Image: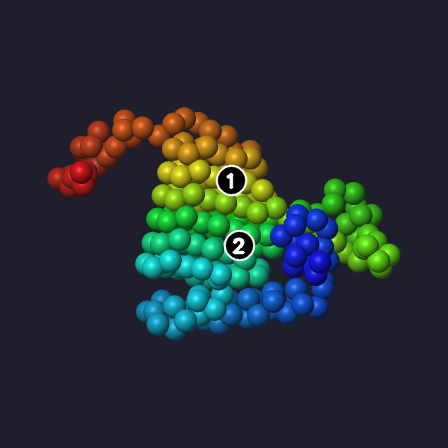
């Protein structure tokens, strides 16, 4: 296996591998170029984001700045919105469904480093060569999810459809669909039901109405 195949297999890989470094450099440079654009340079932004991520459905908008590690290891569905400072460390695959909305400073990480300091510094690969190594676990986020500001999603987490993740949450375990979860570590607070509809907040609606 080459180093990228090792990432997807969930085994130790060498992030300093020349081919991996080239892929990351390409993504980092494209992100830097995206971050230098103006918000109304929509065509230029579309061209750049198409080069950065593996897939992006129609209707997506990323406020910027954005930071993708590999970029091509991320797949995003339709009508995605990300506010300022979206960071995706997508060594392993990151999948995001349709109609997801992220507040400012959302971070998704997939790599995991050894706990012992000596092992973080150096290990021996399968050929006996000393290398700095880590491994990674994929992240999957369902459709219709809302993440508040400063949410951090950790490696290996799956978040179901229709979830709301409260601001500042650190998500270290799977979150089931149709739930509101928050905290550090993030935990399920309750199920989201029809009782959460805006129809029950007439003072906030101020004459507006929900679509039925």
**Can residue 170 be seen in this snapshot?**
no
**Can residue 26 be seen in this snapshot?**
yes
* Residue 176 x %, y %: 46, 32
Q: CA distance from mark 2 to mark 1?
A: 15 Å
Residue in view at x 72 percent, y 64 percent: 17
Residue in view at x 81 percent, y 54 percent: 126
Graded by Cα atoms within 10 Å as few (under 14), some (14 to 19) or many (20 or more), the crowding at tag 2 reads many
Report whether 110 appears left or right of 133. Answer: left
Report whether 114 appears left or right of 170. Answer: right
Residue in view at x 70 percent, y 49 percent: 11
Q: Secondary structure at mark 2?
A: strand
Report whether 129 appears left or right of 155. Answer: right
Q: Nearer the viewer, residue 177 or 5?
A: 5
Sequence-first tag of 2 and 1: 2
Q: Which quadrant of the rendered structure holds the N terminus?
A: bottom right
**As drawn, 153 above or below 57:** above
Q: Which mark is residue 158?
A: 1
Q: Nearer the viewer, residue 86 or 79?
A: 79
Graded by Cα atoms within 10 Å as few (under 14), some (14 to 19) or many (20 or more), the crowding at tag 1 reads many
Residue in view at x 59 percent, y 49 percent: 110
Query: Which image quadrant is residue 5 in?
Result: bottom right
* Residue 147 x %, y %: 42, 43
> Which label sits in the foreground, 2 or 1?
1
Q: Which quadrant of the rendered structure holds the C terminus?
A: top left
**Farthest residue in the left direction?**
207
Q: Which residue is mark 2?
A: 88
Q: Secondary structure at mark 1?
A: strand
Q: Nearer the viewer, residue 42 or 21?
A: 21
């Amino acid at each position: 296996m080459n180093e990228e195949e090792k990432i997807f297999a969930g085994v130790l890989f060498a992030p300093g591998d020349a081919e991996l470094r080239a892929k990351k450099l390409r993504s980092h440079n494209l992100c830097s170029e995206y971050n230098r654009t103006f918000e109304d340079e929509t065509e230029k932004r579309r061209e750049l984001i198409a080069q950065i991520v593996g897939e992006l459905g129609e209707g997506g908008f990323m406020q910027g700045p954005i930071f993708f590690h590999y970029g091509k290891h991320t797949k995003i569905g339709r009508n995605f919105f990300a506010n300022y400072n979206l960071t995706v460390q997508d060594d392993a695959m990151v999948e995001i469904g349709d109609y997801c909305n992220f507040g400012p400073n959302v971070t998704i990480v997939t790599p995991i480093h050894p706990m012992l300091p000596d092992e973080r510094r150096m290990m021996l690969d399968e050929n006996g060569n000393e290398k700095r190594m880590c491994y990674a676990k994929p992240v999957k986020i369902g459709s219709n999810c809302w993440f508040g500001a400063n949410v951090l999603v950790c490696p290996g987490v799956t978040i179901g459809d229709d979830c709301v993740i409260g601001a500042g949450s650190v998500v270290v375990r799977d979150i089931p669909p149709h739930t509101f979860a928050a905290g550090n570590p993030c935990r399920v607070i309750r199920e989201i039901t029809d009782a959460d509809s805006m129809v029950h907040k007439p003072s906030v609606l101020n004459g507006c109405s929900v679509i039925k």
